[in-house]
Amino acid sequence: MYKYGSVISLLLTCAALVACQPKPSDDQQQLQMLRQDVKNLQIQLKQVAKQVDEIHQIATDSTRPKTKTLPTLKDLDLGGTLPSLGSKDAKVAILEFSDFQCPYCKRFMDTSFSKLKSEFIDNGKVLYVVRNYPLSFHSKAEGAAIAAECAKAQQQYWPMRERLFANVKTLGDELYASAAEQLKLNMDTFKKCLADPAIKTQVAADLAYGQQLGINGTPSFVIGKVKDNQLIEPELLVGAQPIEAFLPLISKKLAD
């Protein structure tokens, strides 16, 4: 009897202890609920952020221009004889194949080149090299390329290039002569250069080199890392692309 009574007494005591514990106040309950709401909101935000990242990736992939990987290009600037802009110590280079009569080349010059120059070339990050690619159905393209090469012989390639692209519809001997005079070139030397078959052969060699790489349209750009005057892991980008098309390629090469 004693033991039974003791058990009853103990159970009653435990029950009393449980019943006598203070209940959380309303403020505490609200605080706990608020904390749970915050946790739920954090989980939802993480899920939304993940979905936004996935959508951004899909959108980026769908708008990013397609490129083609090429083998390593040796002698990038052809022994320093090709027109170039930027630092020779740049870690990344862009090799452009261009046609002076091509409207898309002009569009690139008018809309993207200056941005590319100011953001990457002028600050030494990118070396920009140019080769001729006069398309056969552009009757004035070869002559314009020869005029540009003859201006290069007098260290005036880039100013001549600007004038040629600014006057795509009036390419011809008259334009070449007036541009040479404006640039204060030695006119006798310039005229002899225009008639020099070696310059025409040089332009044809640029065209043949581009065809060997698989270039079939202008403008075309080969972008890669530079080491020992070689273009490593080059990628071919075709068309009058906006600056945004170059950014991921250049950034990737610079990061590597």
Image: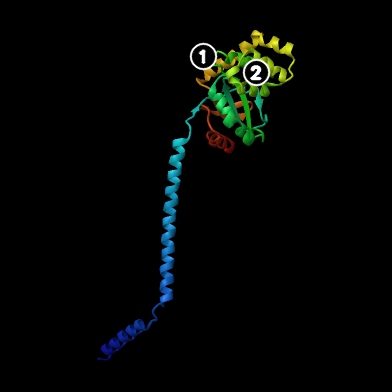
Q: Residue at x 57, y 34 (%)?
A: 250
In the drawing, does residue 75 fall left or right of residue 65? right
* Residue type pointed to by label 2: Ala
Is disc 2 placed on a helix, strand or loop? helix
Q: Is residue 60 visible?
A: yes
| Farthest left residue in view | 1
Could you classify mark 1 by the number of other residues whose Cα lies within 10 Å: few (under 14), some (14-19), or many (20 or more)? few
Q: Is residue 154 visible?
A: no
Q: Whole-percent x and y of residue 99? A: 57, 20
Is disc 1 placed on a helix, strand or loop? loop
Q: Residue at x 64, y 20 (%)?
A: 78
Q: Which residue is mark 1?
A: 137
Q: Whole-percent x and y of residue 186? A: 75, 15
The quadrant of the rendering that contains the C terminus is top right
Front one among 41 and 135:
135
**Is 224 drawn above or below residue 46 in the view shown?**
above
Q: Residue at x 65, y 18 (%)?
A: 148
The quadrant of the rendering that contains the N terminus is bottom left
Q: Whole-percent x and y of residue 175? A: 65, 16
Q: Which residue is mark 2?
A: 148
Q: Residue at x 54, y 34 (%)?
A: 249
**Is 76 drawn above or below residue 190 in the view shown?**
below
Alpha carbon separation for disc pair 2 and 1: 19 Å
Where on the picture, by quarter, is residue 24?
Answer: bottom left
* Residue type pointed to by label 1: Phe
Front one among 80 and 247:
247
Could you classify mark 2 by the number of other residues whose Cα lies within 10 Å: few (under 14), some (14-19), or many (20 or more)? many
Q: Which comes sooner in the sequence, label 2 or label 1?
A: 1
**Is 180 drawn above or below residue 17 in the view shown?**
above
Do the residues bearing badges 2 and 1 touch, measured as CB atoms within 8 Å?
Answer: no
Q: Whole-percent x and y of residue 205? A: 59, 14
Front one among 194 and 175:
175
